[in-house]
Image: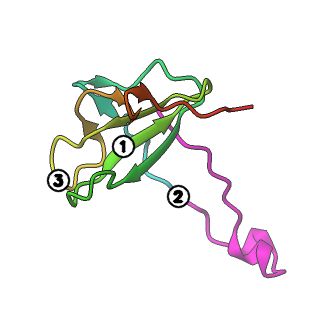
Amino acid sequence: MIVPSLLVVPAAALLGGDPADAPPTRFADPVPLTAGGAPLEGLVYPSPALVDLDGDGRTELVLGDLWGHVWSASPLQSGDVTAFGERAQVQCGPEPLKLNNW
């Protein structure tokens, strides 16, 4: 399951108010992302982003991993941001795109 890291700070704390007075922050239960019909697994420290890579109006899932590989997967249905087709490495010419991570 891919769950991006998120730091939530009550607005009252940022504005100098008492954080105890802020309403509780609530999130829905996490939804696993799938690629190729299976939960997206096997990436170390994934960095997911949703972007229209090819200008077709559909949002692809783009993932970077610890080793600098960049992966993408196209949505199975327009507007569904949880189910994607098979992931593939993003190409830069004939070679897979790899970014230095160090």
Earlier in the chain: of badge 3 and badge 2, it is: 2
The kind of residue tagged 3 is: Ser
| Residue 28, position as x, y percentages in the image | 43, 51
Q: Nearer the viewer, mark 3 or mark 2?
A: 3
What residue is shown with label 1? Answer: 61
The kind of residue tagged 2 is: Arg
Disc 3: CA contacts within 10 A as few (<14), some (14-19) or many (>=20): few
From mark 1 to mark 3, how far is it between C-alphas?
Answer: 12 Å
The kind of residue tagged 1 is: Leu
Q: Secondary structure at mark 3?
A: loop
What residue is shown with label 3? Answer: 78
Which residue is depicted at the point 42% across and 26% down?
95
From mark 3 to mark 2, how far is it between C-alphas?
Answer: 27 Å
* Dominant secondary structure (helix, strand or loop) of the stretch shown in magenta: loop
The C terminus: image quadrant = top right
* Side of 102 relative to 30 (left or right): right
Please state the extent of the stretch shown in magenta in the rendering: 1-25
Q: Which disc is residue 26 wearing? A: 2
